[in-house]
Image (cartoon, grey):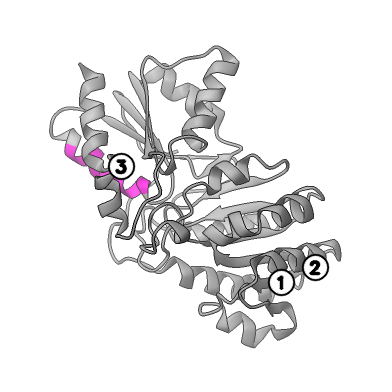
Amino acid sequence: MAGSFNFGEWISARSVIGATLNEIGAENEKLFVCTPDVAMNLIEFKENYPERFIDVGIAEQNCIGVAAGIALEGNIPVVMGMLPFLSMRACEQVRTDVCYQNLPVRIIGTGGGLTSGGGSTHNAMEDIAILKSMVNMTVVSIGDPNMIRDILKLSMDYDGPMYIRLAQGKKDRPIYEPGTVEFKIGGSVTARDGKDITVFCHGEMVGEALDVAAELEKEGIDLRVVDMYTIKPFDEEAVRKAVQETKGIIVWEDHLMAGGLASSLADYFVDNNFYPKQFRRFGIPQVYAGFGAGDEQQAKYGYSGKEIAACAREMMC
C-alpha cells in the first residue's frame, strides 16, 4: 500500500490525542481516560465527561493499576502520559495488572526515543524492548500525527492491551494525506516504493527516511520506505516482499539498536531460515544520552539521515 505525502503544516500530536479521545467519548460510554498529571491536552474530555476522567497525579504505577480496575469492570481505559515513566516506572503494573489479565488498556504518550530533550531520565529508549517482551501486549509506533485518530478508533474494538508510542508530540510532521491510507493493527505502509534498498522504520524516522530517499533519487538510488507502525505483531508479508525484491534491508529507529524493531526482524530471519542479501540496523547505541534536540542526538550517535544514505550507497556497490 502506498501513501501520499503531505509535508505542509506541522501538527501537535498531543492535541490530536485530546481531540480524538473527546470524539470517541461521545460515541463510546465505555471509554475512560486516566493520566498521571499530564492533562493539558485532555481538558475537553475532562469537561465533557468528568465522571470518566481520572487524574491520579504524578503516580504512574497507580494510574496503571486504576486503569486495570476500570477495564475489569468492562470498560476501555486510555492512559495518557510520558512514555519513559509509563514503560519503566510502572513496568510491573503493566506486566502484572494489565498484560497478565489481558485487559484492554491503551497506553499512549510522548517521549519516544531521544526526542524529549530532557536527557536520559526523560528519554524512552528502551520502551519498545520492554513492552514487546510482555505477553499479550501489542506495540504501535506512530509517525504521522493524523494516524493517531485511526489507531485509537481501531483500538476500541481490539482485544488485549496496547502500547502506542509517539515522539515529542509538540510539532509533528504529517506524512499521509488524510483518507488515503487504511490502517490496521499488525499492518504497515509502503510510504515510498523502490526497487533497490528497503528502509524499515517507525515513528519520527519515517518522515526522515522519505527525505533521505528524495536525496538518493538524485543519485539514481531507488529507496523503498516502509512505515512499520505496528512493531508487535509486525507485517511479515511486507518483510518477505522487501527481502525478495530489494538488495538490502536497513532498519532505522529512534530506540536502542538492541531490542527494538531490528531485533524482531533479525529473530524472524533466523527462526525462518530466510535472510536478506544485506542487513544493517541504525539506532541508539549502548549509551545514556545527554540533553539536546532529537536531530542533534541522532548526529552525535551516528544514526542520522547522513549515515542511512551512506549505508544505502554502500549496499548498492
Amino acid at the residue labelled 1: Phe
Task: Provide residue 46's location: percent of width, then percent of height.
Answer: 63, 83
Task: Provide residue 100's location: percent of width, then percent of height.
Answer: 79, 47
Question: In the image, what residue occupies the spot 42% across and 17% down?
Answer: 276
Which residue sits furthest right? 73
Crowding near the residue tagged with mark 1, few <14, some 14–19, many ≥20 C-alpha atoms within 10 Å: many
Asked if residue 192 is among those painted magenta in the image, a careful observer would answer no
Q: Read off the residue under disc 2.
A: 70
Are the residues flagged by discs 3 and 2 in contact, CB closer than 8 Å?
no
Are the residues flagged by discs 2 and 1 in contact, CB closer than 8 Å?
yes
Question: In the image, what residue occupies the spot 16% across and 27% down?
Answer: 220
Q: Is residue 15 left or right of residue 282?
A: right
> From what the image shows, is residue 128 above or below residue 249?
below
Name the front one of labels 3 and 2: 2
Q: Main secondary structure of the magenta part?
A: helix
Q: Read off the residue under disc 3.
A: 209
The C terminus, quarter of image? top left
The mark found on residue 32 in the picture is: 1
Q: Is residue 173 left or right of residue 217?
A: right
Amino acid at the residue labelled 3: Ala
The N terminus, quarter of image? top left
Sequence-wise, the earlier of marks 2 and 1 is 1
| Closer to the camera in the image, 100 or 235 | 100
Question: In the image, what residue occupies the spot 63% across and 78% down?
Answer: 57
Sequence-wise, the earlier of marks 3 and 2 is 2
| Closer to the camera in the image, 152 or 60 | 60
Q: How far is mark 1 from mark 3, CA to CA?
A: 36 Å
State the extent of the magenta-drawn residues as a range. 205-215
